Image (spheres, coloured by chain):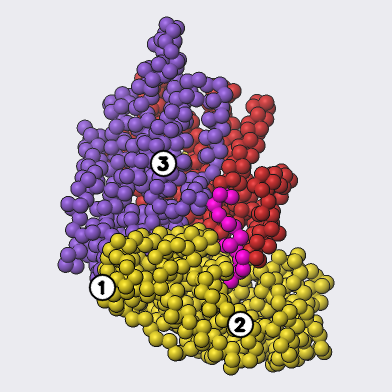
Amino acid sequence: MRIPRIQVVALVALAAALLPAAPAPAQDRAKAKEVVVAFAAEPRSLLPNTIVDWTTNNQLEHMYDRLVDRDAKSYKPAPMLATGWKIINDTTWEFTLKQGVKFHNGEPFNAQSVKATMDYIKDPASKSHYTPRWAQVKDVQIVNDYTVRFITEKPWPGLIDRMAATDFLPMPAKALKEQGVAALATKPIGTGPFKFVQWVRDEKLVLERNPDYWQGPADLSRVTFRYIPEFSARLAALLAGEIDIMKDVPPLNVEQVDRSGKAKVRATVSSRINYLALVNLKPGPMQDLRVRKAIHHAVNVDELIAQVLRGRATKMCGPLSPLNVDYTPKIECIKYDPARAQALFKEAGVDPTKLQLTLDTPSGRYPLDKDISLAIASQLARIGIKTNVVVNEWGTHLDKIKNRTTGDMFFLGWGPALEAQGTIEQLFQAKPTYSSFGNNATIEAKIAQAVTVVDPKKRLEAWAELQQLVHAEVPWVFLWQQHDLYGVAPWIEWTPRADEKVWMYEAKVVAR
Amino acid sequence: MRRNALGILGMVLAGTAIVAALAAPLLAPHDPLVGDFAQSLKPPGTAGHPWGTDQLGRDLLSRVIYGTRIALFIGICVVCLTAVVGGLLGLVAGYFGGWPGTVLMRLVDVQLSFPFIFLALTINAIVGLGLRNIIISLAAAGWVVYARVVRGEVLSVKQREYVQAAAALGMGRARILFRHVLPNVLPSILVVASLQFSQFIVAEAAISFLGFGVQPPTPAWGSMLSESRDFLYVAWWLAAFPGAALALTALGINLVGDWLRDVLDPKFRA
Amino acid sequence: MRAYVLSRLGQTVLVVFLSLTAVFFLARLGGDPVLLFLPMDIQAKDLDEFRQRLGFNDPLPVQYGRFMAGAARGDFGESLRYKQDALGLVLERLPATLRLGLLALLLTFCLAIPVGVISAMRRGSVWDYVGMGGAVLGQAIPGFWLGLMLIYFFSVRLGWLPTGGTGGLAHYVMPVLVLASFYAARIARLTRSSVLDILGEDFILTARAKGLAELVVVAKHTLKNAAIPIVTLAGLETGQLLGGAVITETIFAWPGVGRLTVQALLNRDFPVVLAAVFVISLTYTLINLLVDLIYGWIDPRTSRA
């Protein structure tokens, strides 16, 4: 009789398994100043300047610093590893570098590091996503140990905006040369506030405080990133006190998190914008400006925000949000006005009750995206328009937008959108990959001109004019800026940022 | 006989599902697709919405009732497709043996070595999401069972005397196959079908969980259950009612299957 | 015997080859892989350059030939998403999945076989109803839902078990339970019906007539004979167990192959998908070879051809 014996063994094993687990409870973590942050995915690489991906860069920025940061309030470019910059001529930018900064391996940060980093980005062997992003930079010249010049092919006023993102995280020149790229990929060496300890694939990334950080040591002694792909499991982990910070608490669960005692929700208005594209890059009713306008009048954005998103979004009237440094306030909202919509349809000779539209939407990519799309469809139904909502898997959604095979409308989020060029140049011309609107000669000519204006004031004016031109064309139903909802343990003092950067150097443990 | 009692319970449950599916427009108090989002997430017992409403204010009871249609539709389509395709392949492979049999068995191996969830995801990634494609991917995964079972049965039926005799008398192969072999194999096809039926309904839920299920606004139980995750801990009814409907229907069909099995297989008449 | 094993190994190679071929072409029909791992502000020109560099612009047969040549050497290429050796990524996660799968299998057998046997022996009793009712319910409850409910009660409400991840033994409890639930339900039902089958056979009736204690009858004859279909099903379903692992691993943040494969499929990370298919179909066919060998051991009469 073999089976019963196996059963006994199994029972013992089960009993042993049922003994309480010993993950460090929240109180101990608070005392030791260790914070656990949960993300949906692990970094795609530990090499900086290689992959454009929010989660990846967020984690990397704990170990690497930017050359130019963004001010946490105004979101304008602010000094970081570069103490200052100036424009020498139309094609030359000069950066002054911070002195006395050391990488985690003791190597000094200087002009060599900047040059080596750009060399890495431009090397085809790196297969870096940033290669095309820096294509306009012809050369990096070392003026002295702490001064470098970026020489561009053509005038490129947008360089500073590009720099003030995760697009340029200096790497150590000597280590790169002596140990090679592969070594840096397994053990990152940056100048950042935390040092690499351990990476367990698909499970966690552990970092410890860099005591010699040039801006002063972080308050936290240890940061662990844990990867929990399923969002409801992530929420459960927060409610169980296993993790201390998570992003994207569902709007409907806010109250519950606040009541749990394990965490509080901290919200911020994000620079990420959500919109409903009215596609004019393919034949159909959206070719007609009056129809686009009518659709906009038929959608009640306030109702969507209040009822579906429970107020967790901030309405937008034009293509840029007020957080965008190039934003102009001189744009009037297109109001919810079904009567005006009907009148416009009549003017265009379109009978809304005979209109059959298709709306493409992703599911689970943005807060309540699919539900919003369904709600928009039912709002359009109120004036008789029949809308077929097609839910796509994310990859298919991107394919459809790129191949211009979506329906007449699609839902998309865009960001972080902190400067005009990244949005207007990408989304309102016929050619760019994810655009939905184009073939307007005036707009395309103005864009081509605006991207070359170096003078800051004239630049601002050029983008302001474009925002008005774009707005008048009603290429989208302008929706809103998302609110980012973070669940944060009560013993952590940390304010979320609009640019979606989750940076634990800014977090402190509150004495209780 | 208590076995019959269970069979009757199964038939009652399955019958309820069938009635709900057929009479959905009469039974459902509201349109399952249209909601008033001022009335969203109302708990059960709210006036006019005995089972509450979902995130878009749609009536849950109506959605669950219409969901019966989707569930039975998926089940019936997949079972018919798989039984016909798998059954025919098994019949041919079993009766003719030789290389068709070998080829079939290797195909079965290839199919089985690849978890059906992956297959469903791959197929959906190619042909897009939706009810039709769910049925295709479930069918693509489900035919194997029939092929195996039928082939085995045919191999044994082939040895029986009357089949041998028919062949000796010069009866055509196709005729033997359909006149003598098929009727003998039918009961096992029926049993497998009834047992697989409920599995397919549950499988739809699993696929929905991974984001590939029947797409909204279609009220499929699996996708409703999967969507309820967004409101977990705040709207229990969104998970409870579709979940119960799914479990009870699956239970009912399973019980009927068991009963059928007992009836068709004389060995079990105790 | 040796010839048999050799021919089966030959078939294994064939099955793996066919699986890879099928998935290679299926996956390529799915869409552009390049879009999903490049940033959204990428321009058409750069997109094409990336595609060119990765060889996606070549004709499909050329790509296929190149892939098979690589695969034969164990080189599945570099993950598009992670810029790492694809097979390495899969193998790195294999132990976690195997640990989970084997424990679930063990639990399944410890639970399902006794339940099935008792239900059959005491047919029509309360035990039968409870056992089979549980089994039917186990089949009717979607795994992800069970998982989320367990997390809610045992982790959030009671705080007894961790919500996910790996670590101590406690981390195994819920994932193993969820993974085993569906599987156990099927095995229990199958056990019951095959035991019933055997109980009706002549030789058991003879044994009973001879006056052997009933327990010995069960142990000696019934179980041994009933084992064949059970072992067969167990082998055949290992592939599906892996499918179940996808959901379990996703919910419980378990760093395994299933989760990696689904992510790779969603991200169209073809090298990883194909490396995973290779590992999965190889594992599957080898397990079934093992099952066939166990067959011969259980029942030496079964001649294999």
Colour that chain C carries in the picture: red
x and y, in percent, of residue A238 in the image: 45, 72
Which residue is rendered at x = 23% and y = 39% of the image? B11
Output the letter for the chain in yellow.
A
Residue that numbered label 1 is attached to: B38
Q: Tag on residue C186? A: 3
Identify the element where label 2 is drawn.
Answer: helix
Q: CA distance from mark 1 to mark 3?
A: 45 Å
Identify the element where label 3 is drawn.
Answer: helix
Output the letter for the chain in purple.
B
The kind of residue on which mark 3 rests is: Arg
Residue that numbered label 2 is attached to: A449
Query: Same chain for the residues at labels 1 and 3, yes or no?
Result: no
The kind of residue on which mark 1 rests is: Ala
Say few, some or many: other residues with alpha carbon within 10 Å of mark 1 (under 14 / 14 to 19 / 20 or more): some
Indicate which label's residue lies in the foreground, 1 or 2. Answer: 2
